[in-house]
Image (cartoon, rainbow, N blue to C red):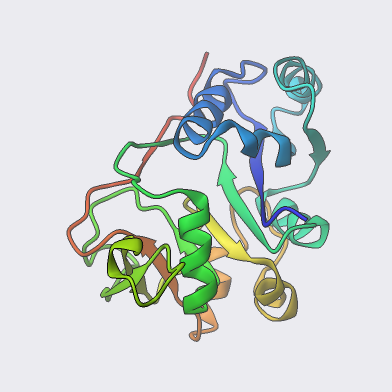
Amino acid sequence: MNTISLNIFTNATESAPNTAVISRTLESIMIMFGPDIYDRLTFYLDPHPGIDKARDYYENIKKHYPLPEIKYCQSLSDGYLKSIRDARTDYIFQCEHDWEFLPTIKHSLDDILYVMKTRGLYHFRFNKRENKVAGWDTKLEERLSFANDNDANILPMKIFFSYCLTPNVSNNPHIIDVKKYRDEIAQHIIVRPGSLGIEREINAAGKYQSAIYGPLGYPATVRHLDGRGKK
């Protein structure tokens, strides 16, 4: 069984049925993490707000990406919960349709998953800004781990890997541990319209944290695109 799969959450915005933004997102993911991730891709499509354009948007996505499955949902939170229930891998990569991954990411998905598993991390995020205290990231604690530990007695075999812990769980591009979410965290998610129902609800529980790629002061690893803009 594959260890990780990719979910792209999208909706029929003003730019639909144009697929330029979602294509840019997927291209940057495949450049950064390899084309094999395409074979483990599912789209979750919310037809709101442009319900009249949703079918054409669906068809355009299918035309450009014929292999992955496209599943309808009623909102981001609805699709997110469905993706957890649907998951057939230990981890899932959760990404909305309008993000570009940057070359500041220097590790593979295998490296990241190794660190998540060995450190018990259940939410691993890529940051849209420098790693510093800002917004909901009210506290950051840097950690050093190793991405490759084939032989713990041979230091050159190890790849250094730094991340920061934050009390903020964010919808920004992230990887989650499916079991942790199925068993516990998903119960805090509420199906609400649009992009509501996930971040605030999980953070309100007051007992979860996430890891952010890179040490303190590390530059942004993703850039937010204008997914709602006109064609």
Left or right: residue 56 compared with residue 127? right
Frontmost residue, 146 versus 203: 146
x 22%, y 67%: residue: 133
The image shows residue 24 at horizontal and vertical percentages of 50, 24
x 69%, y 58%: residue: 192
The image shows residue 162 at horizontal and vertical percentages of 30, 65
x 47%, y 63%: residue: 124
The image shows residue 90 at horizontal and vertical percentages of 70, 64
- Snapshot quadrant of residue 145: bottom left
Q: Quadrant of the N terminus?
A: bottom right
In this picture, is 96 found above or below 130?
above
Q: Residue furthest bottom?
A: 207
Frontmost residue, 37 versus 102: 37
- Snapshot quadrant of residue 88: bottom right
In this picture, is 160 found above or below 52?
below
Q: Residue furthest left?
A: 217
Frontmost residue, 129 versus 179: 179
Task: Say if residue 64 shows up in the picture.
Answer: yes
How many numbered tags mark residues here?
A: 0
The image shows residue 149 at horizontal and vertical percentages of 43, 69
In this picture, is 123 found above or below 43?
below
x 51%, y 35%: residue: 29
In this picture, is 23 found above or below 69?
above
Left or right: residue 14 compared with residue 5? left
Task: Say if residue 41 shows up in the picture.
Answer: no
